[in-house]
Amino acid sequence: MKKIVVKNLTKHFVLADRSRIDVVGGLSFDVEDGEFLSILGPSGCGKSTLLSILAGLETLSGGEISIDDKRLVPGENGVRLGFVFQQPRLLSWRSVRDNIKLPLEHGTLTREEQVNRAQRYLELARLQGFENYFPLQISGGMQQRAAIARALTIEPEVLLMDEPFSSLDELTARKMRAELIRIWQETKKTIIFVTHDISEAVYLSNRLLVVTERPARVYETVSIEVGYPRDYDDDRLFEITKKVGRLFLQMEAAHAT
Amino acid sequence: MHTILKIYSIAVLVAVWVVLSLLFSADIVPGPIPVFEAIADNLRSGDGWFHLYKTVSRVLLGLLIAMFLGSGLGLCMGLSVKGEKFFESWVMVGLTIPAVVYAIICLLWFGLNDFAAVIAIGVTAFPAVAINMWQGVKDIDMQLIAMGKAFQLPTRDLIRKIVLPQTVPYVLAATRYALGISWKIATTVELIGMSNGVGYMLHYWFGLFSMTQVFAWTLTFVIVLLFIEYALINPFEKRATAWRAVVQV
């Protein structure tokens, strides 16, 4: 079943001097329900803009997005979306628990249900014992885990992730990726994961889209039929990583000519 | 550690005062003992409390007006570029005009009464509040607001839970600054046009060349301001910024 269908999406910004920047130039793809899809592209290619549009933070210039066969209207999307940013974006004056609880507070849950729900995802993100800590008292990796817990606590149907591990050291990032896969398999969410790290995208996803430089278009789709949990040293993953690396070089050569 | 340093700094200040009072005659620098005796006398008579009450109530009412107007204008300037461009020159003009001019204008317009005093204090202090709030709103982290929007927080929650907590340090700075200005302009207004209050008493004792009483009244008010700082503003600041204190260990 198709969860999200993006058809011929375009986005441009008009700058103060009236010049126009085309950020997304006719992007089409779809995402299956429960799929882990990575969008892989060079830095500054409009990947983050795509997520902002999906989350209703930006309007689209052209094309169409539908989620659950319903056309996306910015700001009033019926589907629950969780968003994990590149930086944790926690409120430093709130405890870890209250940060995770934040998106629940305007919903229909009672106070007790909110706390219980926050606690459940806090534990899923392995933050038990740190409920009452402030964000500045815990490590960057833990802050990012809290941000992931915050996105999961609303039990989103779709989880959008914008290079969530790029600011972490590789060792922490590896642990976090394994945790993310564990959580994904436990919760069966649909995940759209944006990154510029090839081996990260290959390790994590069912399928990845290689996206061109600005204005972003889909250059190639790569399926990764390797079961979970995966091993970093798996030769099959390594072969796919090499193949995607070659795709990138081809894409750049094509762009240069 | 910090408390000891504070006590030490006050002790040094008093010591300097004692030394100066020994070097000069009591007409020029009266010592701490006669000054504190004068303070006690003033307060025992009941009259002292009345003048103190007059000034404190004017200062607080004026401060309230300044915070209200200043926050409104500061928010407007911080949130909208048009507002910023439009009001920027107003605030600069407001800051440039000497406080005593506001005092004179208000007394001439509204007469020699409390209303004139409170308005003069409010108008003098509000540009400083506006500037602090303006800066505070401009420093708000837009990424956090985008986060709130991504999680579909209603506007009310965005303001209450994400915007306002970020402005707390600026509100505190504005309050401190405005309190200092308010007290200075209050004394000026009372000195020019009032028949009660600390400023009036300073004027009165100035006429009688009593340096001891001038010192006594000044010190009385300094103590009141320190009380407001340490009993009200400081504890609030500690509570509001508790998350920051733990990092500074």
Image: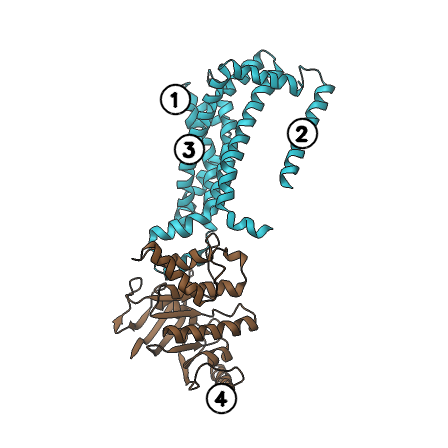
The answer, for residue A186, to whether it is visible in the render is yes
First along the sequence among labels 3 and 2: 2
Q: Indicate the quadrant containing the N terminus of chain A: top left, top right, bottom left or bottom right.
A: bottom left
Chain under callout 1 = B
Q: Amino acid at mark 1?
A: Phe
Please say if the residues under marks 3 and 1 sit with CB atoms less than 8 Å apart: no
Q: Amino acid at mark 4?
A: Arg
Q: Which secondary structure, mark 3?
A: helix
Give the label, 2 or 1, closer to the camera: 2
Question: Residue A101: horizontal and vertical position, in percent?
Answer: 39, 58
Residue placed most toward the observer, B195 or B43? B43
Q: Can you tell which mark lies on residue B110? A: 1
Question: Residue B232: horizontal and vertical position, in percent?
Answer: 49, 35
Identify whether A7 is placed above or below B65. Answer: below
Residue placed most toward the observer, B90 or A169? A169
Q: Which residue is mark 2?
A: B13
Q: Which secondary structure, mark 1?
A: helix
- Same chain for mark 3 and mark 1? The answer is yes
Q: Amino acid at mark 3?
A: Leu
Q: Colour of chain A?
A: brown
Residue placed most toward the observer, A161 or B194? A161
Q: Can you tell which mark lies on residue B64? A: 3
Give the label, 4 or 3, closer to the camera: 4
Please say if the residues under marks 3 and 2 sit with CB atoms less than 8 Å apart: no
Q: Amino acid at mark 2?
A: Leu
Give the label, 3 or 2, closer to the camera: 2
Q: Compute the Cα span from label 3 to label 2.
A: 32 Å
Q: Which chain is cyan?
A: B
Q: Compute the Cα span from label 2 to label 1.
A: 41 Å
Q: Which residue is mark 4?
A: A236
